[in-house]
Image: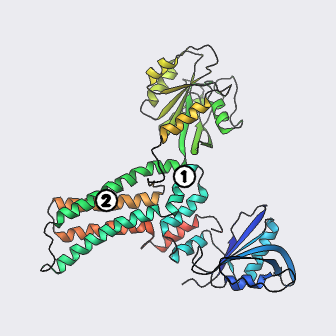
């Protein structure tokens, strides 16, 4: 049982219009009541739930700030406990001063994620929904934000609970039949169980495969810019980033190492990497840069291959083309404002990839590139109204383990194994799915998950 009261800043410790101090626990209202008074120094009743009161924060007889106080009485609060939020002016010193007074009057400073942890421990949300809170805060693009909001609304929980209900019902029937064979028969049940488990496996396969999209949604598409020296790679990076991030000169080999930046295109996060120009060289440092560029390309989700249209293709180009043949790749025909030595149609035939004419110098064709990136990866495949996307690696691992256990059930059915073999693997799958919701997980895992949350959430 949680019997202490915690407090923290719910807004960043930075200068802003307002700041919010959150207090949660059995003494939240009592502690806040000692600090809040009216303009003329009289006490203010803040005990009524879901009401906002106006008053002043006092430290002893000294009025510190004009505030609004919102009270939420258990269980109708985020944490499931009595909760008070104090909206004060957003000066760093003022917020810190009020927080010190709250602590002085009986609360303790909350640990990272402790408010959400209490919501989980008090049964207000399950573990998958708690993790969605952290994902919402850390979302860097529209797709990831929508996926996290859907998860917070219970999209993952509902699906997992549905699977577990079917598994538990089938397992209970088998157990009952084994205990009372005279009244409950298992004749024909193998076929029924086979259909039930096959359908769940199909759904699990879809969820597991969605984790690849989920990873890109959450972490961003790892995008490597590849090309020969002076093809315009660094100029392209600067345009996409919106600042002079990479050094651009007419000297070949200016970029010697990889340069990484995070950008957002049409609601999609990209981790974009500029690389050294690909060519044969005797320069030791440049040679290392070329090797790193090729290594980065091997681990990329997307390659943007930049071709200088004013120069004929050479061995370095053919080396790159061979390298990217089996990867997701967009080819940019740069310097299209100059006389061309490379035709778009010929390049598309040679590479088998989409070729987009651009001019990094004149900022031409960049909109087409951004649209192609969006279409290539999502192309309306992700519909957040009806499609569930797995974005959490822990969830994916639990789904894989549950899937394997259910495959064992199928194997037992097809090999005419005794029914008690079914129950072992059914309950294994049931438990693995339960871990997603936070059932029977260890205290260490719970602490590790919530330690990654920001302070005050």
Number of marks in picture: 2
Query: How far across and how far down the image is residue 275, in percent?
Result: 59, 33
Q: Is residue 288 visible?
A: no
Q: At x 34% / y 56%, what residue is drawn? A: 203
108 left or right, relative to 418? right
Q: Earlier in the sequence, mark 2 or mark 1?
A: 1
The image shows residue 373 at horizontal and vertical percentages of 53, 37
- Residue 200 marker: 2
Give x and y (percent) for residue 204: 35, 56
For residue 74, side relative to residue 328 (left or right): right
Q: Mark 2 to mark 1: distance in Å?
A: 26 Å
Quarter of the image for the N terminus: give it.
Answer: bottom right
Q: Where, by quadrant of the figure, is residue 452 drawn? A: bottom right
User: Residue at coordinates 70% horizontally, 65% vertically from top-left?
Assistant: 11
Q: Secondary structure at mark 2?
A: helix
| Element at label 1 | helix
Check residue 154 in the rendering and tell me which mark sits there, or answer none. Answer: none
For image coordinates 51% across by 65% down, the residue present is 129
Mark 1, Cα crowd under 10 Å, few <14 / some 14-19 / many 20+, is many
Q: Nearer the viewer, residue 387 or 160?
A: 387
In the picture of the structure, the residue carrying the numbered disc 1 is 144
């Amino acid at each position: 049982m949680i019997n202490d009261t915690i407090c923290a800043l719910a807004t960043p410790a930075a200068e802003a219009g307002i700041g919010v101090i959150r207090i949660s626990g059995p003494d939240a209202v009592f502690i806040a009541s000692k600090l809040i008074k009216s303009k003329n120094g009289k006490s203010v009743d803040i005990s009524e739930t879901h009401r906002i009161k106006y008053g002043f924060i006092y430290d002893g007889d000294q009025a510190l700030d004009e505030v609004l106080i919102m009270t939420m009485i258990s269980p109708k609060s985020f944490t499931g406990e009595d909760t008070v939020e104090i909206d004060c002016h957003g000066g760093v010193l003022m917020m810190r001063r009020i927080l010190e007074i709250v602590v002085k009057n009986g609360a303790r400073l909350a640990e990272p994620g402790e408010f959400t942890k209490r919501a989980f421990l008090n049964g207000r949300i399950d573990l998958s929904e708690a993790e969605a809170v952290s994902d919402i805060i850390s979302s860097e693009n529209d797709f990831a934000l929508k996926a996290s909001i859907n998860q917070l609304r219970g999209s993952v929980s509902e699906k997992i609970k549905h699977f577990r209900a079917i598994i538990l019902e089938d397992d209970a029937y088998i157990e009952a039949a084994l205990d009372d064979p005279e009244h409950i028969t298992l004749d024909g049940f193998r076929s029924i169980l086979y259909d039930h488990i096959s359908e769940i496996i199909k759904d699990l396969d879809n969820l597991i495969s969605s984790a690849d999209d989920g990873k890109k949604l959450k972490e961003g598409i790892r995008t490597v810019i590849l090309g020969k020296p002076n093809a315009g790679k660094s100029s392209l990076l600067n345009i996409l980033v919106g600042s002079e991030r990479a050094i651009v000169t007419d000297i070949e080999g200016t970029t010697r190492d990889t340069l990484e930046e995070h950008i957002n295109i049409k609601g999609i996060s990209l981790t974009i990497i500029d690389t050294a120009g690909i060519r044969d060289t005797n320069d030791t440092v440049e040679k290392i840069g070329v090797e790193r560029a090729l290594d980065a390309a091997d681990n990329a989700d997307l390659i943007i291959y930049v071709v200088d249209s004013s120069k004929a293709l050479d061995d370095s180009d053919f080396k790159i083309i061979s390298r990217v043949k089996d990867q997701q790749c967009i080819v940019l025909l740069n310097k299209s404002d100059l006389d061309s030595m490379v035709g778009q149609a010929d390049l598309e035939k040679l590479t088998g990839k989409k070729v987009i004419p651009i001019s990094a110098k004149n900022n031409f064709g960049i909109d087409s590139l951004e649209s192609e990136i969006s279409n290539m990866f999502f192309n309306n495949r992700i519909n957040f109204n009806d499609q569930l996307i797995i974005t959490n690696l822990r969830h994916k691992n639990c789904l894989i383990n549950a899937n394997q256990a259910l495959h064992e059930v199928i194997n037992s059915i097809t090999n005419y194994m005794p029914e008690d073999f079914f129950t072992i693997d059914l309950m294994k799958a049931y438990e693995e799915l339960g871990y997603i919701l936070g059932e029977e997980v260890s205290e260490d895992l719970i602490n590790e998950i919530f330690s990654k949350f920001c302070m005050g959430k």
